[in-house]
Amino acid sequence: MKTDPVCPKCSSENIYNDGSLWICPDCSHETSSLAPPRDGGGGDAQGFVVRDAHGNTLQEGDTVTVIKDLKVKGSSSSVKVGTKVKNIRLVDSSDGHNISCKIDGFGAMGLKSEFVKKS
């Protein structure tokens, strides 16, 4: 029995896939991963799946490597390519930053999973 995905923000069933993003035309919400439908079928314990730039599934506590220089808002420096980030936490936020972590020299911040690879 196949169930259609729903928008995690407004629960609309009009959501569609556009490459690596799921887009809801009703509320304009965009996400790279989707929560399972509200009937409780499928998915992991958190209810959503986060994948890195190469399509590998990420889990809580994983170590990832940054694959692109990332500018940090409010700072003149940037997170350099090759920076290892340990003990990540997965979050389902509306701004697209689905990894919460601490980076040495920067502190706590959010990262988008499309700019990291699993180590």
Image (tube, rainbow, N blue to C red):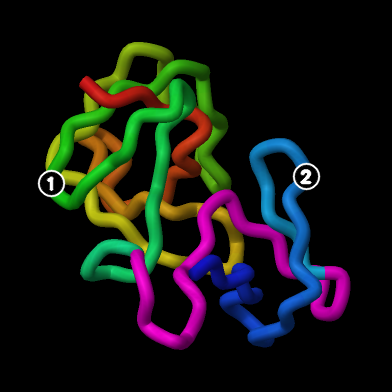
In this orientation, which residue lies closer to the viewer: 27 or 36? 36
Q: Earlier in the sequence, mark 1 or mark 2?
A: 2
Q: Which region shows up in magenta?
A: 25-42
Q: Position of residue 24 (x, y in %)?
A: 78, 68
> Element type at marker 2?
strand
Q: Position of residue 50 (x, y in %)?
A: 40, 48
Q: Name the residue that disc number 1 marks.
A: 61
| Most distant residue in the top direction | 82
**65 lies above or below 33:** above
Q: Position of residue 104 (x, y in %)?
A: 21, 34
**62 lies above or below 41:** above
**27 lies above or below 59:** below
The amino acid on which the numbered mark 1 sits, given as a three-letter code, is: Gly
Query: What separation in Å lies between label 1 and label 2 (alpha carbons)?
Result: 29 Å
Q: Name the residue that disc number 2 marks.
A: 18
Residue at 58%, 68% (x, y): give it. Answer: 94
Quadrant of the snapshot with the C terminus: top left
Q: Of the residues tagged 1 and 2, which is closer to the observer?
A: 2
The amino acid on which the numbered mark 2 sits, given as a three-letter code, is: Asp
In which image quadrant can residue 2 be found? bottom right
